[in-house]
Amino acid sequence: MANPILVLAEQVRGELADITFEMLGAGRALAIASGAPLYAALLGSEAAPLAAKLGAADKVFTVEHPHLDLAPAGTVAAALKGLVDHTQAGLVLLGCTNVSLGIGSMLAAHSGLPLVNFCRAITFQAGTLTCTSQLFGGKILSDVKLADGRGIVSVYPGAFPVDAGKHDGTPPVEKVDLAVEAPKAVFKRYVEPETGDVDITKQDVLVGVGRGIQTQDNVQLAEDLAQILGGAVCASRPVIDQGWLPLSRQVGKSGMTVKPRVYLALGISGAPEHWEGMQNAQCIIAVNTDPKAPIFDGAHYGVVGDVLELLPVLTEKIKARKAT
Ligand SMILES: Cc1cc2nc3c(=O)[nH]c(=O)nc-3n(C[C@H](O)[C@H](O)[C@H](O)COP(=O)(O)OP(=O)(O)OC[C@H]3O[C@@H](n4cnc5c(N)ncnc54)[C@H](O)[C@@H]3O)c2cc1C
């Protein structure tokens, strides 16, 4: 795998997204293992100021054009194909996110490179690049080998540490002049999503409540614990559907993907749709009355017990410990 590795830096409204640094960290590990250089691609009219933040790359290539601001996938894919040709990149890393999903398949069509979607892990060993893809909401993990290490890999957010891709130092930047066609779909305006009171994707500690919490009033028991732990309360879908917490607190397939240091799953059965959103937590502690609840299959620690009995005791014990 001697050809360069090219990471498409993802930006949302002038800010680099975490996935950019996740991919740069993963790309750096591959670059070390394979001896290939690591490049970053930055597209859009505001590319130049962001390039300085990509110190983990050996070099940053920018294509500065207003047509690339919030551009549809086809426009980005065409520009990226120009950069793949310019840099002779063999491996392209893209975010498997709402922003970048769709670019990979179009770039594959333009370039003839194979596409691996939903990638959670990448290794380069004995000359072979292997990508592990997560399919069916995490029920199946599939290893895909890329011949000669060449391909397009769409990387699942939260699969790699963000910090590994953050390096001090200013990388060399090359501005590449490419003809960029006017996109067929035009961005009109940004509609702000309803803001939640707390961003659960940024919390170190999350106290997750499920249907086992039983009533809206009992959610306060979880709030008390979250407060003493310096975290926030989140929930499974039935709790949100009941209106006991706002939608911004929902974890799972149709909610948020979270990656706290600690995730307490209280009265949550561990359905695949919930598991999908919290499986990247560093430490999962489950409390459930049912010893056969599926959440125990993946949790690092489990307590078979009643959350309503445990919560007040736990909060008081932590309070007492903190006081001393
Ligand atoms: C397309 C689709 C998308 C979905 N998206 C999401 C999503 O984003 N997020 C999500 O969470 N779900 C989602 N779901 C729903 C998902 O399938 C499950 O129904 C849901 O996660 C179950 O929530 P729960 O674990 O709180 O409830 P349950 O499955 O009812 O589990 C409650 C658990 O609490 C335990 N319990 C009961 N009383 C106590 C007690 N006193 N103390 C301790 N434990 C107790 C029970 O033993 C049980 O294990 C989705 C479903 C579909 C079809």
Image (cartoon, rainbow, N blue to C red):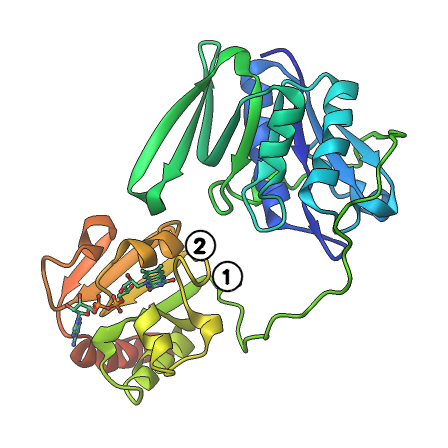
Residue 258 x %, y %: 45, 57
The answer to whether residue 264 of the structure is visible from this angle is yes
Snapshot quadrant of residue 26: top right
Residue for badge 1: 201
Residue 210 x %, y %: 28, 71
Residue 231 x %, y %: 44, 70
Residue for badge 2: 259
Residue type pointed to by label 2 = Lys
Query: Regarding mark 1 in the picture, which secondary structure is present there?
Result: helix
Instruction: Please report the residue visible at 76 percent of the width from the left and 65 percent of the height from the top.
Output: 189
Snapshot quadrant of residue 113: top right
Query: Regarding mark 2 in the picture, which secondary structure is present there?
Result: loop
Residue 136 x %, y %: 34, 43
Q: Quadrant of the N terminus?
A: top right
**Distance from mark 2 CB to nearest ligand 1 atom below 8 Å:** no
Snapshot quadrant of residue 303: bottom left
Above or below, 244 against 302 in this view is below
Mark 2 and mark 1 in contact? Answer it, CB < 8 Å: yes
Above or below, 215 against 179 in this view is below
Instruction: Please report the residue visible at 44 percent of the width from the left and 63 percent of the height from the top.
Output: 255
Split into quadrants, the picture shows ligand 1 in the one at: bottom left
Above or below, 182 against 264 in this view is above
Q: 200 left or right of 108? A: left
Alpha carbon separation for disc pair 2 and 1 = 7 Å
Instruction: Please report the residue visible at 48 percent of the width from the left and 66 percent of the height from the top.
Output: 200
Above or below, 164 against 200 in this view is above
Label 2 crowd bin: few (<14), some (14–19), many (20+), radius 10 Å: many
